[in-house]
């Protein structure tokens, strides 16, 4: 099955599906985040689980062959940290850090939890190749961007079923990393489109996803002088997995009109 990338020796080459909505010569954030997660996953020791991923998107990743490299920063009894980078033309284009933890029994006692109701679409609503579903405010699930070009709270439901790299199974960690980049969209999609572009994304996980469908619900957007911090809840049909946070810069001169027909 075709994937977002194809492997050619020591490099990977992007397929058309990876293109950014901001610039067709650049790759979008979800496949870039997934590619870095794939590399970092090779640094996860047996018995550990990924608990945090931070991706810094400080240069555009170009539609050219990509080299991904990584190193283990520290491997401990309960905590392991690893770094990864995407390199093109001897220049680091994006980097990521992952925190892997050794799970165990929870401590005794009870602690507070928000326990919010997190809506999910009906079973079978997503098929191979489907675009994400969205909700705005109290509306139903729709894919048409014109239904969501407003200032209501957004929820996104994504089913990533294609392999990240052709010929390889998509892991739960890679899937979650790709969905995490949609945080910018659910937090910053307003009445005039998406006017912020995220410079990073941080995802935290208390457990891996249980299947190929994940939801993101906007929790807050804190803005001042062209900088916005967007926060969303990441969840699946079983319940909450963790949180996603993006730091975004105003791109008001060239917003993405999500209601426009696909190019």
Image: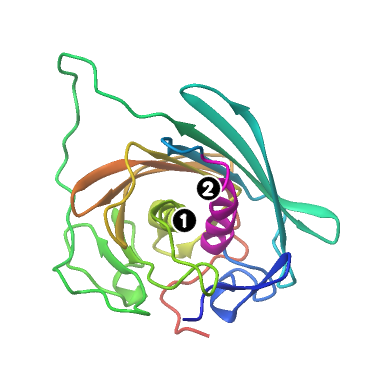
Query: How far is disc 2 from disc 1 in space, using C-alphas?
Result: 8 Å
Q: Is residue 4 above or below residue 175?
A: below
Which of the two marks, 2 or 1, is nearer to us in this view? Answer: 2
Q: Which mark is residue 53?
A: none
Q: Main secondary structure of the magenta part?
A: helix
Depth check: give the residue in front, 32 or 208.
208
Q: Position of residue 84 (x, y in %)?
A: 66, 45
**Residue at the right extreme?**
90
Left or right placement of residue 73 versus residue 207 in this view: right
Q: Quadrant of residue 114?
A: top left
**Up-down: is 23 above or below 72?**
below
Q: Which residues are magenta?
A: 29-44
254 to the left or right of 193: right
Residue at 34% of width from left, 64% of height from top?
A: 158
Q: Position of residue 139 (x, y in %)?
A: 18, 64
Q: Earlier in the sequence, mark 2 or mark 1?
A: 2
Place of residue 77 in the rendered image (x, y in percent of width and height, measured from the top left) = 49, 21
Q: Which residue is mark 2?
A: 41
Residue at position x 63%, y 67% from top? Answer: 27
Element marked by disc 1: helix
Q: Are marks 2 and 1 in contact (CB under 8 Å)?
A: yes
Residue 38 horizontal/vertical position (percent): 55, 55
Q: Residues within 10 Å of mark 1 (few under 14, many from 20)?
A: many
Is 196 colored magenta in this rendering?
no
The residue carrying pointer 2 sits among few (fewer than 14), some (14 to 19) or many (20 or more) residues within 10 Å by Cα, namely: some
> Residue at image x 44%, y 72%?
258
Q: Secondary structure at mark 2?
A: helix
Relative side of 253 to 244, left or right: right
Badge number at residue 174: 1
On screen, residue 142 versus residue 183, left or right, reads left
């Amino acid at each position: 099955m075709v994937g977002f990338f194809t492997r050619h020796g020591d490099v990977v080459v992007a397929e058309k599906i990876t293109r950014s909505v901001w610039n067709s010569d650049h790759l979008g954030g979800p496949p870039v985040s997934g590619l870095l997660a794939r590399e970092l996953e090779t640094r996860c020791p047996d018995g550990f689980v990924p608990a945090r991923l931070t991706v810094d998107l400080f240069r555009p990743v170009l539609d050219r062959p990509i080299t991904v490299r990584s190193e283990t920063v520290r491997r401990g009894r309960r905590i392991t940290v690893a770094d990864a980078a995407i390199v093109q033309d001897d220049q680091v284009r994006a980097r990521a850090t992952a925190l892997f933890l050794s799970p165990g029994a929870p401590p005794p006692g009870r602690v507070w939890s928000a326990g919010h109701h997190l809506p999910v679409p009906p079973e079978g609503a997503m098929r191979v190749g489907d675009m994400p579903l969205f909700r705005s405010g109290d509306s139903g699930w729709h894919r048409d961007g014109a239904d969501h070009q407003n200032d209501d709270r957004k929820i996104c439901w994504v089913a990533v079923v294609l392999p990240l790299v052709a010929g390889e199974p998509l892991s739960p960690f890679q899937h979650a990393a790709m969905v995490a980049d949609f945080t910018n969209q659910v937090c910053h999609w307003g009445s005039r489109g998406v006017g912020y572009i995220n410079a990073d994304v941080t995802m935290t996980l208390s457990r891996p996803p249980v299947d190929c469908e994940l939801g993101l619900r906007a929790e807050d957007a804190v803005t001042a002088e062209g900088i916005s911090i967007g926060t969303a809840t990441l969840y699946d049909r079983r319940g909450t997995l963790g949180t996603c946070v993006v730091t975004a810069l105003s791109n008001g001169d060239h917003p993405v009109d999500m209601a426009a027909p696909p190019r």
